[in-house]
Amino acid sequence: MATSSILPNRQVPPATRLPPRSLLVLGLPICLGALLLAMLTSIAFGAAEINATTVWQAIVNFNPENTNHLIIQTLRMPRAVTAALVGAALAVAGAIMQGLTRNPLADPGLLGIEAGAAFAVVGAVFLFQINSLGTYAVFAFAGGGLTAIAVYGLGSAGHGGPTPLKLTLAGAAISALLSSLTTAIMLFNQRTLEEVRFWLVGSVAGRDFALIGQALPYLVIGLGLALVLGRQITTLNLGDDIAKGLGQSTVWIKTFSAIAVVLLAGVSVALAGPIGFVGLVIPHVVRFFVGVDYRWIVPYSMLIGGTFLVLCDVIGRVVARPSELAVGVMTALIGGPVFIALVRWKVKR
Amino acid sequence: MHHLKRYYLLGLLLLALVTLSACIAPAANPAPATADTTPTPVAASATEALSTTVTTVTAPTPSTGPATIQHEGGETTFTTVPQRVIVLEYSFADALFALDLQPIGYADDGVPAYLLKLLKATTAEPVGTRNEPNLELIARLKPDLIIADTTRHTTIYAQLNQIAPTVIFDSYRGSYETQIEIFEKMSQIFHKEALAKQVIADARQAFTAAQKLAAGHERNISVGVLAGTGFTAHSNASYMGTLLAGLGLPTALEPLEGKSQFLVDLEGIVTLKPEAIVVTCSPEDRGLWGEWTSKPVWQQLDAVKNQRVYVFNRDLWSKSRGLLSLHLVLRDAETSGLLAGESSRSVTCPDAVEE
């Protein structure tokens, strides 16, 4: 059990850490409410001053001739939805990665998904001079997916199958290689750097519902897999031997978990570019409140991850009006201190 | 074992780098730098290509005593006229050509086409990018003057100054008038004040002619660059902002925290309520242009409905900022219908302008 805490050798009595089931059930609608509230805040806020009544009218009684309604419907709503979906997907992907590798510092980046996506996009911009969010998304998803498969393949080679250590090493090696190549291309070709530098930070600005629609099926499958696998990941988290002893087919669980991570993180990077910290920090925050059972960690990560990213996006727009800070900057600015506070608290115990 | 893996990685990376550099290495301009006297008159054909700007070609004036120049890095005194000049921003290259001189080295990360044509006619060599000038290449050319920009080169100013006397100006974030002041200072270094006066007079004359065309069509505009994944708006303190304001086309956007240009979203443009929109972009950005202009909010803008969106080449309009490029910019502004307040004739991001 203790493996999910930041210091694995420190014993945390799990029985006292688990909140009662009724509280956990009650918490879900509260978190859902928080997410909806954050999304409403995001929709109500922007460069144009639009009063609350108009915002509400735009949602319930949309008039395509009205510029304010169009701003709400075609600019702000897709943005809020993108942030919510990407936040949810990243947090869940991070939670699964941490459970799968029994590494508290794991996040989707460990499978090389972000590095692979960045390399594919930068390479495509350089070679084919593509330049639209729609085509970026296709290359990002393909690049992230292929890299994850390569990492997983390399990490599974040899006897013993995919062990956490081998996966971590393979991921680190391939990520390092791809990141250097990405940097090399950008240094050689200034134009490419200019084109992709905002995408590379991670942003949810300018996304539309068409793009979200393309991403949605993958997201639904990924989140569905994660919810179904919650029980098995909890068991797997106890160690391969115990899981096997309890009659689990660990190879299949690991493979399906990896597929879920690739779908979730791949779609996230396709929609919003590489956004760090959400996948690392949110599962820890969630575990802090709901304990170590992945049947609860997954849905809570979904809701809290979504809320977190939506709020980061709102704050990024408030602090630098009328310009904005990309959401990828904000997640690190806010996620960093939260993570340090969490580590300090755990060390003290 | 661990080391082996690292060497393996390193080897792979090196291999990849070599392959990459082979792909990217500039195909042209293999001419080695011969140490001939550099500030020779520009080839006549190259000058003629740039309309009537440089009409009189004065013989190299002998040095008339030392010249002391005030710039952002302090004060530099030149006892002799520099012969081997390296420019690290495009506007400085433009200024040299306007002064009938030429550089021996220039920063290159996509030189505007009209300038590249002039540079190709010389023996000047690229010395890295504007963001990362290659100090070794610069030193190898043995310059006796380097002209740098505050935005990109303040951090390496000391190193540049060790290689050769370096003057540093704020061209990148400077207004239209700032560019003219910089041009005047540069002319003092080379004792070319007389020629500079005439170049400036030519520019002012062309500007006044454009103002006359625009008279009676004064409108609020938004101006910016469409690149990457968004729109970088240029405020009323930027080069493009001040240039267009001088023509009776002001933008309401104020600078933000000292930045004269910054990213805004579509909503930001809506709040400015522009009567016309000036967008600059590169041919590679046509995909983005299509995406951007198909947004319902964009199509709902008055300027779009009234066909008052004027699209120009980004390299020429926002990267050049020179007195030679000014004539090309003004010609663009006239032919597009922008000055006379006519319907826009532009469709998408235009190709590079060569002459």
Image (tube, rainbow, N blue to C red):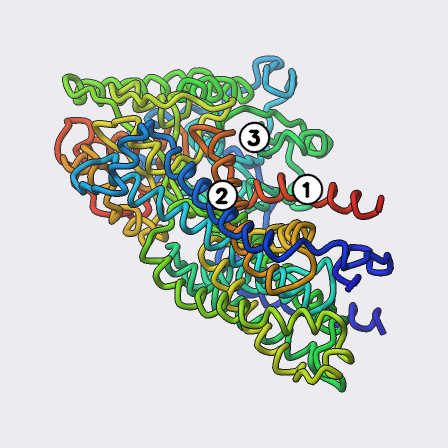
Both labels 2 and 3 in a single chain: no
Q: Going from the N terminus, do you reach mark 1 or mark 2 first?
A: 2
What amino acid does circle 3 point to?
Thr
Residue hosting label 2: A34
Q: Is residue B130 above or below residue B58?
A: below
Is residue B297 placed above or below A282 in the rendered structure?
above
Q: What residue appears at the point 21 percent right and 27 percent down from the top-left corner?
A: B275
Residue A82, x across and y down, in percent: 42, 51
Q: Are marks 1 and 3 in contact (CB under 8 Å)?
A: no
Could you tell me residue A261's position as x and y percent? 57, 67
Q: Residues within 10 Å of mark 1 (few under 14, many from 20)?
A: some
Callouts 1 and 3 in the same chain: no
Which chain does tag 3 point to? B
Quarter of the picture containing the N terminus of chain B is bottom right
Do residues under tags 1 and 2 come within 8 Å of each other at their CB atoms?
no
Secondary element at image label 2: helix
Residue B86 x, y percent position in the rendering: 58, 36
Eye-nearest disc, 1 or 3: 1
Residue at 48%, 30% in the rendered image: A318
Residue A338: assigned label: 1
Q: Chain of mark 2?
A: A
Residue behind mark 3: B151
Look at label 1 and name its amino acid: Val
Q: Is residue B11 visible?
A: no
Real-space CA distance between mark 2 and mark 3, rounded to the nearest whole angstrom: 43 Å
Q: Is residue B76 left or right of residue B56?
A: right
Label 1, label 2: how far apart the Cα atoms are = 19 Å
Residue type at tag 2: Ala
Q: Quadrant of residue B43?
A: top left
Q: Chain of mark 1?
A: A
